Image: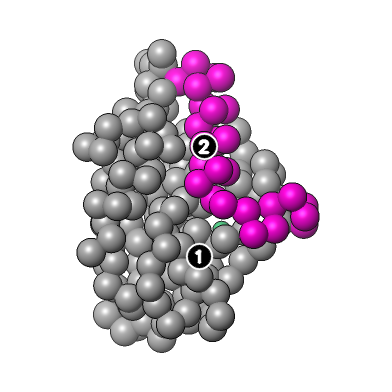
Amino acid sequence: MGFRIGQGYDIHQLAEGRELILGGVSIPHTKGLLGHSDADVLSHAITDALLGALSLGDIGTHFPDTDPEYKGADSIELLKHSYKLVTEKGYELVNADATIIAEKPKIKPFILQIRERISSALHADVDAISIKATTSEKMGFVGREEGIAAQAIVLLKAL
Ligand code: MG
């Protein structure tokens, strides 16, 4: 009974003049994600999955986008903070699996770097962090390159 599972989903708009950051990694692209923080959609989805696993609310309750403290925030720091809440509740990460849904750019060359960044934030082995990427086959808002979405699932076990 010492296991908890959580899932997270997030989406941000793509806009000109913004840096594209996914999983704490800056990815060269003509557009970046728009948001109050650095709009790192992948880190947000994993953060929500961690919080959800322990019924701790969501990223918006812990880091309100109306709070100037989080303007331009590094979302890896929000992820670290959420994982601290997880350990304080007596749990640790078993593994995380996430999917980035983006038409462009190609994410594959950055996958290992993203896995390393997320695993170090969560004090986990790289093998415990799976990051995948898919396109939307040119359909819908992702297909029109209006935004990028991410979903994540995590398993926690009691310490
Ligand atoms: Mg978000």
Can you say which quadrant of the picture contains the C terminus?
top left
Q: Which mark is residue 80?
A: 2
Q: Nearer the viewer, residue 98 or 121?
A: 121
**Picture coordinates of residue 116, whole percent (x, y):** 31, 44
Residue at the spot 48% in from the left edge and 37% down from the top edge: 50
Instruction: Please identify, in this view, whether the residue under mark 2 or under mark 1 is nearer the observer.
Output: 2
Q: Which residue is mark 1?
A: 11
Secondary element under disc 1, as helix, strand or loop, is: strand
**Picture coordinates of residue 71, whole percent (x, y):** 70, 58
The quarter of the picture where residue 7 lies is: top left
**Picture coordinates of residue 28, whole percent (x, y):** 38, 73
How crowded pointer 2 is (Cα within 10 Å; few <14, some 14-19, many 20+) is rated as some
Ligand 1 under 8 Å from disc 1 Cβ: yes
Q: Earlier in the sequence, mark 2 or mark 1?
A: 1
Q: Is residue 92 above or below residue 44?
A: above
Can you say which quadrant of the picture contains the N terminus?
top left
Asked whether residue 152 appears in the rendered view, the answer is yes
Left or right, 66 with reference to 155: right
Residue at the spot 62% in from the left edge and 39% down from the top edge: 57
The quarter of the picture where residue 37 lies is: bottom right
Query: For the magenta stretch, what is the residue range?
Result: 66-91
Which kind of residue does numbered mark 1 sit on? Ile
Give yes or no for residue 85 being in the magenta stretch: yes
